[in-house]
Every structure is written in structure tokens, then in C-alpha cells.
Amino acid sequence: MVGVSDEPGPVRRPAAGPAPGAGPPLSLTLAAIMREVGAHSGAVYLLRPEERILEMAVMAGMPRAFAAPWERVGVSAPIPVAEAVRERRLVWVSGEQDMARRFPRIAVVLPYPFSLAAMPVATADTVYGALFVTWPGARPAELSGDDRERLTSACDRLALLLERATAEERPPGPEPDLLALPTSGTVGTLGSLGSLEAARMVSRLPYGLMSLDLHGRIGFANAAAAELLGRSAGDLLGTLPWVSVPWLNDPAYEERYRDALISQRVTTFVALRPPDEWISFRMYPSTTGLSVRVARIRAVTELRQEAERTGAGPARLVTISQVLNLAGALTEAVGVEDVVQLVADEVVPAVGSQALAVLGSRGGRLHVLGHRGYPDPRAVRCLDGLPLGTSTPGAQALDSGVPAFFGSVEHLRRQYPERHRAHEASDGFSAWAYLPLIASGRPVGTCVLSYAEPRCFPADERAVLTSLGGLIAQALQRAQLYDAKKQLAHGLQDALLPHSLAPPPGVEAAARYLPATQGMEIGGDFYDLVPARPMAAAVIGDVQGHNVTAAALMGQIRTGVRAYTTVGQPPQEVMRSTNRLLIDLGAELFASCLYLRLDPARGRAEMARAGHPPPLLRRPNGRVRVLELAGGPLLGIDSGATYPTTEVFLPPGSVLALYTDGLVESPGVDIEHAVARLGALLAEVGDLPLDHLADQLVRHSVAARERVDDVALLLLRASGDP
């Protein structure tokens, strides 16, 4: 029998029409297609053209809850039915590893051995929707030509039915729930035992028997099963075991039921019934539900034998809930180092490995992006620079996109005799998983998980690990792009700032620049010391915004200031000219600026200010005051603005501190108090050598430590030396 889900789902008709159910019988059509190709589950989607959305109209063979994340999907979504519609072709997924490589989002939720075919439901002119059908994992890797032809013909017939229904203004709508359709040669579950004598026979068996329907609800339980579960048969009927039995309330056990239904293979798990009794569950699936044998394991040796015989322990190593949690955590990683650290902190413990290496490629060679947990780092560093064609599992996984699992050193040696060239030779581990990191259809790296003990990698665990590889790949691709953009942006900003300062005789200078640490944004903070004649000039400023435009405009302002200084303009004219330049550029950004001309011979400095934080002046006696200078508005606002100048006395030993607001401004802190604290620190340590003083001022600034904004600091000391 082919089970059709009786859980209602959102089905919206493409256009107005008659009463629901007037269109073609999609459930009957789907069931016929599944029987024709021997599939055990499937679904039909209808296209809403105005929204470019595919909506599930009916699902058969599996509970609709299994496909809940894909009830309603966009045509651009990275899933098989959407790809079938986009490319107007049959999409074949041969198994769990193929699914994990190509459609990791599905493999994360359904990491079980099954194959899938998706087809567009379309005529030559119009796409009406799509369908998919699935088979258990024990199926040839290729779809046969006969099955391909049957699916193509069935979808063509369904498209004609939908075309006719649309022309007659009776598009398909919700259909009456239909739990099962009759077919030949299928064995039902124990819940369908037809005779009283058969029920009595089952009740006398010394081990527990029960049946679950497609949704996991208990339809039958004999007395032995009820006793082992600790509930009466009446209390169990109609309930989910992992809900009605407290010690089965673990996602790992529900996963085994899903695994059995999707893979259509016998599945076993062992659960601890408090305080110390182990219960074995063996599930026999069919297309209508599950028959479950429940038995007590009486000794530790029997428990071990059961686990070894079935490959199932008390719980699965990585549950779906863990994988989804890891997927959410990976979205928070920013740079490549963040991805490596997060995988080490979250993924490595969850999958039971003890060490991790993430490999990438550059110029046709391996590149170690990061590693954790290896006692001897040389075991990983020896991989750096190996050609991708080298016969090592890490290089081949990256090059081929195919995962590799080695349960023991002997297994690895058999496949890679020249393993001395790979890091496994000296890493001291005994089992490895090599996960190709594939994003946007191309390999971006390899994740190597190393295990201290020999290990068996069962099919479902391989599927989960491969799916994790897909999620790590997406995070790594984003992180590499982020790092590249950040490096480019900060390289641009560094190129626009002076690499050294050349103060005039009688003046010492030191500067510090710290980019913001939050996000990739770069700012427009700048400073400069212009060794012009007859008097040198200094400038500091801050362009509004945190992007490449702000940084580029900062470079233009700095160049303009240098040019106006070189031709001998006085400070007020330099500021007026720079203001007009900024307005003429039409950048729609503003800038604060403080400009001063130094006259060491006279011990004077003439300053002009445009909306910039006031400088601090430390006198030779250690007293510090804030220079409240006259000034004008920000540059770039008013083309007619004027910028009056102020002359300040700079005797030998005095220190002038020019800074941007990133040094004093932080959330929740009054800026005047922050400036006062900066002045107090300058008074206390102002006699230090200028470079040490700059480090102290930056190190003790709360705003500089938080770095929500760029920080620029320029210190000038009047030395009095000729």
C-alpha cells in the first residue's frame, strides 16, 4: 500500500475556481506514478506564477511533517524540485552523500540513505509545478532509462491534466484526506491483523510487539510491549512513543523512526529505562508504517553484542537538533579564523573527534587555513604548499569533491601507501574523516576530522558529517570573501595614511591609527604632518561614514590639504579651500578637521578648526587644558563658511594632543568626561618618550579598547632643539 499523508498543508489555488477538489485528483495521480516506478514516497508541487513560489499540494508515503521545511519554496531555492523547474529537466540524487554534496540543507534535516528524482510538471509553453519521488537507499546509483521514461511520461500526462483544468477554470484545490491506496503484494503492519486469533497469538509472545503508523503513532501494542514501556496498552494507543514514554523523549530515538521510514531498512536503537535497564527496539518498515519488536537486554555483554550487531548504540552521536544548532552558529562566523574556531568549539566535540584541520587552495596548492588539537603542529604545517595533484586524502577530497573516511591507520595505508607525505603520518591519530567543503557548486576547501581511536563510520553518520561539510563550506566561503574585502579595504586605507612622519626641527611627533574592530567597515580618519617651508603644518580629521567612499574621500582631502599648504596658504585659507573642494566633489559626505601651522622658532602654533574635537595642551609644568578654539562648521556643508584661527603658545616641553572622536567617544559614556580622563592621563604620563606616551593614551582609552570607531592620534612635542 502507498500511504498518503493525512496532515493538512497550505494549498493555494492559482486562480479562482469552483469548489475544492474540482481539479484533477493529484493524490491518485501521484500514487499511480509511485507504483509505476516502485517509489515509496513522493509529493506534487503547484506553481504560483505571480509569486514564483512552489507549494506542496499533496504528499504520499511519508508524513507531511518530514517535508515541513519545504512546504512552500521559491523557484530559486537550492532544492531539487526548484532546480527541476528552473532548468526544465529531471534532477536525480543518487543517495545520501550525493544529497549532502549538492543539497546540504536537505541532507541536514534528512541525513538518511534514499535516492530522489525531481521533475518539472510542464507543457511546452507553461510550467504548472513539479513533483519528486524517493526510493530507499538500497537502489542502483543510476536511474534506469525505463524509470526515467516512465517519470517523464507521467509528468507530461499530469501537465496536460493541469492544462485542461486551468483552461476549464477548475484548478486543483485541497483534496479529501486519503491515508492509503490499495496495491498488490505489500505486507501490512501488525496493527492491521485481521483476526481475533492472530491478536491472541501476538499477545502471548514473550517479547514486545507494536505497530506505528506513518506519523509514528502507536496503533497496536501487546501486553509484553506495554510492560516493557511501563504504560498500559490503552494509554499507549494513538500516542507517539517519544511523547508518551518519558525515557524515550530524545530526538535521537525519533530520528531512528524517520530513518526507518525513509530508508525502508530495518533500524535498531537501544534506550535506557531508568534506573538501569536497557531496552532494544527493532523497527521493520513498510510503506504503511512500522512493526516494532521490543525486548529487554539482560546483560552488559548482550548490550555490547546488540550494538555491534546493529551498529546502533544508546543514542546517535549527532542529532538533527544538534546539526541545526551548529548550522545556526556557523551563520555567526565572520572571518576564516572565526569559522575554524567555531568548528573546533562546536563541531569537533559534537562528532566525537579530537582534532581539526581546515584546508583551502591557492595557486593550485594546498593552504592550511587553520587547525586545532594536534599535539605537533608540524603534522599540519607539512601540508602547506603541497600541489593539489599530490596523492593525499586532503588534496584529493578538495580536488574531487568526494568525502573520504578511514576507520583505521591500516585502512589509510592501504589506500595511500605514501602517507608519510601527509600529516597523518605524525599526527598520532587513528581514524579520519575528510569532508570536501563545496559551496556554490565548487570546492572551497577540505575539513579534516581526526579521531584518537579506530572508528566505524556508518552510513547515517557519514551523511551527517558530509552535510556538516556543506554547512561549513558555506560559512567558509562567506568568511573568505569577508577577509578578502577587509584586506582590500584596509589596504586602501593604509595606503592613504602616511607611513612615516617628518617633523620640522624643534618638534617631535608620534602618531597612532587603529581601525574599528566591529565589522569590516573602514573609516575616514586621517592625520598628516606636512614639512612645508617656511613653517610645517599638521592636520587631523574624520570623514563621515565607514566605507570605501569615506576612505577615498579622506585621501582626497589629505592631498588637498598638502597642496594648499605647499603653495603657502594660511590656516584659514587652507580650511576654506578644502571646504570648497569637498563641496565641488559632490560626495555628500561631511568631514571634521583640525589644521595647524607650526612655528617652533617662535614657540607658536596657529590653528583653525572645522567641527573637530578640541585638542589637549600639556604645559611643561604638567598641567593640561582643553583648547576651546574658535572654528567653523564641518567641511562640506556651507560653501561660504569661514574658519577663524587661534594662536597658541608652545614653549619647549609642551605637548599637543590631536585626536579623532574614536579615542574618546563610546556608548553610554559622556564625551566631556572621557576628554577629562584623557587629559588627566596626559598630565600624569606626559613626560614619557612620545612613542610610549602615544601607546599609553591609546591603551587606557575605553573607547579605543572597544573600537566601535576608528581611532587616530597625533602627538606633537616642542623640543626647543634647533
Image: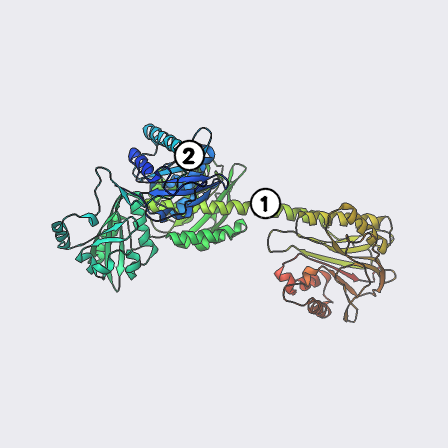
The image position of residue 365, as x and y in percent, is 51, 38
Color scheme of the displayed model: rainbow
Q: Which circle's residue, 1 or 2, is located before the other in the chain?
A: 2
CA neighbours of label 1 inside 10 A, class few (<14), some (14 to 19), many (20+): few
The image position of residue 90, as x and y in percent, is 40, 33
State the SS at label 2: loop
At 36% from the left edge and 29% from the top edge, which residue is drawn?
153
- Quarter-wise, where is residue 133 in the image? top left
Q: Which quarter of the image is occupied by the C terminus?
A: bottom right
The image position of residue 400, as x and y in percent, is 44, 36
Foreground of the two, 719 or 400: 400
The image position of residue 121, as x and y in percent, is 41, 34
Indicate the amino acid at tag 2: Glu
* Residue marked by disc 1: 484
Callout 1–callout 2 Cβ contact below 8 Å: no
Foreground of the two, 631 or 626: 631
Label drawn at residue 211: none
Indicate the amino acid at tag 1: Ala
Q: Which quarter of the image is occupied by the N terminus?
A: top left
At 79% from the left edge and 56% from the top edge, which residue is drawn?
538
**How far is the residue under mark 1 from the one under mark 2?**
56 Å
* Residue marked by disc 2: 168
**Image-based side of 557 in relation to 408, left or right:** right
Foreground of the two, 253 or 710: 253
Q: Nearer the viewer, mark 1 or mark 2?
A: 2
- In the image, residue 333 sits, relative to residue 144, either above or below, namely below
- Quarter-wise, where is residue 147 in the image? top left
- In the image, residue 143 sits, relative to residue 596, either above or below, namely above
State the SS at label 1: helix
Q: Can the viewer see residue 425 in this picture?
A: no
